[in-house]
Image: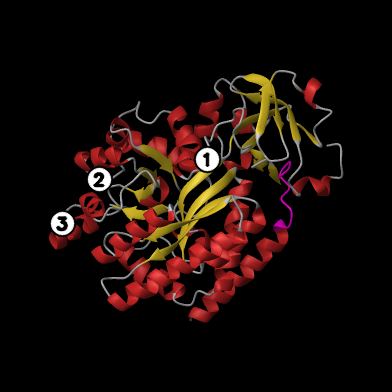
């Protein structure tokens, strides 16, 4: 560091990362004040050091692209550990929904702040969120410097009045996010799921997303029951229903996909849809089937990784999620070669970044500087026979040491500004939420 440490979190400065282990070799990374990677190479520090405002000594660090969480409900961090080990329906009806009925804008703000803190600490630079009071989520993300695609969870349950209210709420959020004028935060439309949104609602979401040129974030085929109900009610499986309502395009990100059949995977591939795998949540809620990664992969579907909300995970650590994904796929589909470590890492980085339009999700010239430095000396990196294997199978997110998003330093050598205040406020807010709901 060649300036006061407190300044380094401001952003807008050119950086030089020196001596990181990147793709098996030692390299320097030069980043301009716009947050774009200008050059990568061995010993380029000699030419670039004069231009850089800050120099980060990355010797003893492994550089990887920033991780992207493609399905979460960030503010649900306030519900971490509130209710576990229950039947899904009782868990929702007796514990989660009654608490959510008392949720306020203030809760969502602090819950999202806590989520962002946890994500930064564990190497995640951006995420895809669906919840309520999302203007407050946007405000929270704006303050952190992370990237996010945010949507309001649109649920009309077939009721025309409710639908109109959901349309208003969706449009209001899109306007609010645009007014923030932060290129790192983009709006999306969030039809909650084919079983909670009417055909009219789904059609509106599709046409609005198209008109506004924004993404669609939807839950898809998470449980066997919802697939069976969908067929009974509409005569179509959920993918066909979404397609019929024009909800499937390259801007669509569908979460879970546990109960997809092979034909559905093929159609998702043809439509260019991305699918977010959420193995921890799926296992915890015992959905009884793993997302068919092999069919999706064969169909050319971009498969990404998500944690889902903290009530069903119970953390936002994508390193754990990579391991769960690689293990669950192998176990469930009885294939010891399915989803190797390199593919799990790509799911959490390049696939996620590309699905949300955050850039290539790779450390390369011209790309946004979304970079995580991992501590090479941590036990999970010792010995270093295979970096990717250690990242996916041995490490947790606590191996993350320094995090850059668009060239702005969000965590430096494990320090995140304001961390203790956020932690304390979020804890108070969570206790208050439980009190209000009783
Ligand atoms: Zn979800």
Q: Is residue 306 in view?
A: yes
What residue is shown at x 56% (from left), y 20% (from top)?
A: 385
Mark 2, ligand 1, within 8 Å: the answer is no
Nearest to N terminus: mark 2 or mark 3: 3
Q: Nearer the viewer, mark 3 or mark 1?
A: 3
User: Could you say whether the residue bearing mark 1 is in a helix, strand or loop?
Assistant: helix
Image quadrant where residue 29 sits: top right
Residue indicated by mark 2? 260
Q: Is residue 111 left or right of residue 46?
A: left
Q: Which mark is residue 204?
A: none
For label 2, the SS is loop
Q: Nearer the viewer, residue 324 or 5?
A: 5
Eyeballing the image, is 397 above or below 49? below
Residue 20, image x, y percentages: 69, 26
Identify the residue under disc 3.
Answer: 231
Q: Is residue 403 above or below residue 160?
A: above
Distance from the alpha carbon under mark 1 to that under mark 2: 25 Å
Q: Residue furthest front?
A: 211
- Residue 319's label in the rendered image is 1
Distance, label 2 to label 3, CA atoms, is 13 Å
The answer to whether residue 3 is above or below residue 209 is: above
**Marks 3 and 1, how far apart in space?**
36 Å
Is 414 situated left or right of 218 in this image? Answer: right
Q: Residue at x 38, y 31 (%)?
A: 339
Residues packed near mark 2 inside 10 Å, few (<14), some (14 to 19) or many (20 plus): many
Residues in magenta, as a range: 411-419
Closer to the chain start, of discs 3 and 1, is 3
Looking at the image, is mark 1 or mark 2 earlier in the sequence?
2
- Residue 285 horizontal/vertical position (percent): 35, 55
Placement of the N terminus among the 4 image quadrants? top right
* 208, 142: nearer the viewer: 208
Q: Residue at x 33, y 40 (%)?
A: 272
């Amino acid at each position: 560091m060649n300036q006061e440490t407190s300044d380094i979190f401001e952003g807008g400065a050119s950086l030089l990362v020196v001596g990181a282990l990147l793709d098996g070799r030692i390299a320097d990374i030069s980043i301009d004040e716009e947050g774009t990677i200008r050059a990568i190479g061995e010993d380029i520090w000699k030419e670039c050091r004069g231009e850089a405002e800050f120099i980060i000594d990355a010797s003893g660090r492994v550089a990887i692209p920033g991780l992207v969480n493609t399905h979460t409900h960030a503010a649900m961090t306030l519900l971490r550990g509130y209710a576990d080990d229950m039947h899904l329906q009782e868990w929702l009806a007796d514990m989660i929904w009654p608490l959510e009925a008392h949720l306020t804008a203030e809760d969502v703000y602090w819950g999202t702040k806590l989520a962002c803190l946890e994500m930064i600490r564990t190497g995640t630079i951006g995420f895809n969120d669906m919840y309520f009071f999302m203007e407050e989520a946007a405000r929270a993300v704006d303050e952190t410097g992370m990237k996010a695609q945010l949507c309001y969870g649109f649920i009309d349950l077939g009721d025309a009045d409710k639908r109109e209210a959901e349309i208003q709420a969706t449009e209001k959020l899109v306007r609010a996010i645009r007014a923030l004028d932060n290129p790192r935060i983009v709006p999306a439309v969030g039809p909650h799921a084919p079983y909670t949104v009417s055909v009219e609602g789904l059609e509106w979401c599709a046409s609005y997303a198209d008109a506004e040129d924004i993404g669609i974030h939807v839950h898809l085929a998470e449980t066997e029951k919802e697939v069976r109900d969908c067929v009974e009610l509409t005569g179509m499986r959920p993918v066909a229903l979404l397609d019929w309502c024009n909800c499937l395009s390259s801007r669509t990100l569908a979460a879970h996909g546990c109960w997809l059949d092979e034909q559905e995977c093929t159609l998702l591939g043809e439509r260019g849809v991305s699918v977010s795998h959420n193995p921890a949540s799926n296992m915890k809620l015992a959905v009884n089937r793993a997302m068919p990664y092999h069919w999706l992969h064969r169909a050319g579907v971009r498969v990404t990784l998500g944690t889902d909300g903290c009530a069903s995970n119970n953390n936002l650590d994508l390193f754990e999620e990579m391991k769960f994904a690689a293990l669950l796929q192998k176990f469930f589909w009885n294939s010891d070669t399915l989803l190797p470590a390199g593919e799990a890492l790509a799911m959490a980085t390049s696939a996620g970044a590309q699905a949300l339009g955050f850039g290539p999700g790779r450390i390369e010239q011209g790309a946004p500087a979304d970079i995580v430095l991992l501590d090479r000396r941590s036990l999970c990196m010792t010995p270093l026979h295979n970096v990717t294997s250690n990242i996916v199978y041995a490490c947790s997110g606590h191996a993350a040491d320094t995090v850059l998003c668009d060239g702005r330093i969000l965590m430096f050598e494990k320090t995140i500004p304001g961390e203790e205040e956020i932690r304390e406020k979020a804890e108070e807010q969570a206790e208050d939420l439980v009190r209000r709901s009783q």
